[in-house]
Amino acid sequence: MIEIKDLHKSYKMGSNSLHVLKGINFSAEEGELVAIMGSSGSGKSTLLNILGMLDGADSGEYNLDNVPIRDLNETKAAQYRNKFLGFIFQSFNLINYKSALENVALPLYYQKVNRKVRQEKALKYLEQVGLKDWATHLPSELSGGQKQRVAIARAMAAEPKVLLADEPTGALDSTTSYEVMDLIQKINDAGNTILVVTHEEDIAHMCKRIVHLKDGVIVEDKKIEQVRAAQYV
Amino acid sequence: MFDRDIWQEIFNTIKKNKLRTFLTGFSVGWAIFILVMLLASVNGMENGFVGQFNDDATNTIFIRPGVTSKAYAGFEAGRRIQLENDDLEYIRQSFPDDIEYISGRYFTNTTARYKSETGAYPVQGVHPEFQIIEKTIVISGRYFNETDFTNKAKVAVIGKKVAEDLFDKEDPIGQFAELNGLPFRVIGVFTDEGDDNAERRIYAPLSTYQRIYGNTNNINQIALTYNPNYDLTKALDFSQRLEILMKRRQKVDPEDQSGINVWNYAEAFDNISSFTTVLKAIGIVVAFLILIAGIVGIGNIMVFTIKERTKEFGVRKALGARPKQIVNLVLLESTFITTLSGFVGLLFAWVILALVGPTIETPAFSNPSVRSSTVITATIILIIAGVLAGLLPAIKAANVKPIVALSDK
Ligand SMILES: Nc1ncnc2c1ncn2[C@@H]1O[C@H](COP(=O)(O)OP(=O)(O)OP(=O)(O)O)[C@@H](O)[C@H]1O
Ligand SMILES: [Mg+2]
């Protein structure tokens, strides 16, 4: 599903240049649930953003669902993102003047799904994350956990091939975090490929594989026994 | 553009961002409102001036001889020009198509007496046609006619005030009044609205006065009206031709305005129209500045709005919005608000003008109104400018990498 080879990325800051990713080789099969760990500043978000085509790499190869991703302009990137990828952010990034339902329906709008189908699908995904009754509420009327669940529903609505989550539980307390992870596990159970960036060991162990990043390279990559979040909920 | 979803998006955004919408809309609506009111005021002033002029506007030209101020054709400066009957006939025959009515004027003063009453009045010896040129309204009796003129009859048409002074309650028609000791039969009384002095005047046939004053052919002034179908240009052209002809005939330097003066009402009108043209130009310049202020206002709000929405655009892009869709969203929204509020401002101004405009009727200001084409042009300019003001920041925002837009700054 995902295949990257010798990926390099550096940020230019004035005359200095900060080499963040120094040759990443990584691949993930369909249906995997991968945790990406590493200390702060190790380049986790950078890697995820490149995978999400929110940012470009300096060099290296990237194949997503056997489509080589290169020479991206903004329009092309937008099309790929819309088709292949769902995002879950630490700070939710819901559009604050749109209701939960409208937020979830938005990626479908950009997929040119017609309005009625959009509403139905959005409601279906809201129901899946247990927020059907909150459909008409604005993000400001929701708790952090609820917001993240709306964001997950939104990421799912587009039915992406890969879900990318950058510290999805970073802004949540542990109980809420487990609820969110429970949701992510269920989505993964349904066959979706998911990459989760996290700092927290317990969250990482709820995935099926942990990748450790250090100084811009992968230092460890292991399959683990998944801890189910449901038991903590 | 006519995609229902986009409009749904836009209405949604507008509904949820009332203050922003109001601010943008207000700056546009206000600019258009002021603009319309300003143009209408200028128009009102113009109407006032033109109206005032038209009140006593006539198609009259006066040819007034004077003293030459320049040596010309062997004559020295300081020569007195004297018009005579020949001149009048010459003019009449030279411009048969241009001239409507023509009359000589001979000015003198008289002591008038009827029974025991006496008074001093100006007398004008004129042709019968002068009644029409001067628009003299005869309230009783009649004006003198061609026969009176040919016969050099001693008849007089007296002003209402003269009649009151001399005849008191008696009917003056048919009575004889002595003018400088000569008996004149009063055949008519005339009035002149609003001008008491004009009613203290006496008209008599020019021919009669020329005989009384030593059998001369002298005329003090020639008054004429030209073809009433002439517009300003034609009228000015005619008085030009007339002046050239008269100056050549009297051997007056073409540049010498004091030798012979041809005075045309149309010239006064020309001055007024150039004055209102200047006024209009000022109005348009100010209106243009207001438009610029409005545009800067929109631009400001657009820049602010787009900055505020950068993160939202980042989210939209992460969800698959193409840059073009972001630009469209911003532009359609701003165009929609600009257009709508532009027309609201327009409507307000129009309603006020329609209600108040016709009731304003003063000499300097009357019926302020604007041509709809002017206003619609201005509105369209404002809309286009609004779009352009939003375009650059929108394009910039739409092309920001989503990662930059999403990062918490
Ligand atoms: N846009 C940028 N411009 C310059 N430097 C950047 C930029 N984004 C990230 N960096 C730098 O690159 C390095 C890696 O950043 P990144 O966000 O990938 O780290 P991270 O592993 O996600 O850290 P954290 O756990 O704190 O989120 C950091 O040193 C960071 O300062
Ligand atoms: Mg990070």
Image (cartoon, coloured by chain):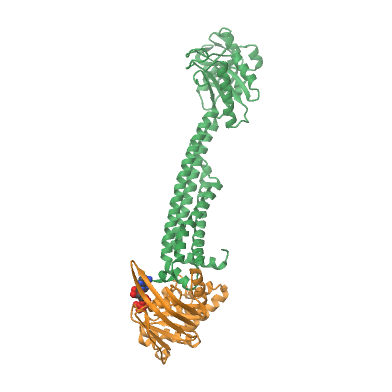
- Is residue A186 shown above or below B373? below
Q: Which chain is green?
A: B
The answer to whether any part of residue B362 appears in the image is no
Placement of the C terminus of chain B among the 4 image quadrants? bottom left
| Up/down of B33 relative to A136, above or below | above
* Residue B234 quadrant: top right
Q: Please state the horizontal and vertical placement of residue B20, each as a whole percent of the image.
A: 44, 62
Q: How many marks?
A: 0
Residue in front for this viewpoint, A149 or B52: A149
Percent of width and height locating residue B153: 62, 12
| Residue B179, image quadrant | top right
Nearer to me, A22 or A29: A22
Chain A, which colour? orange
Q: Is residue A95 above or below residue B175?
A: below
> From the viewer's perspective, is B318 left or right of B159?
left
Q: Is residue B96 placed above or below A118 in the rendered structure? A: above
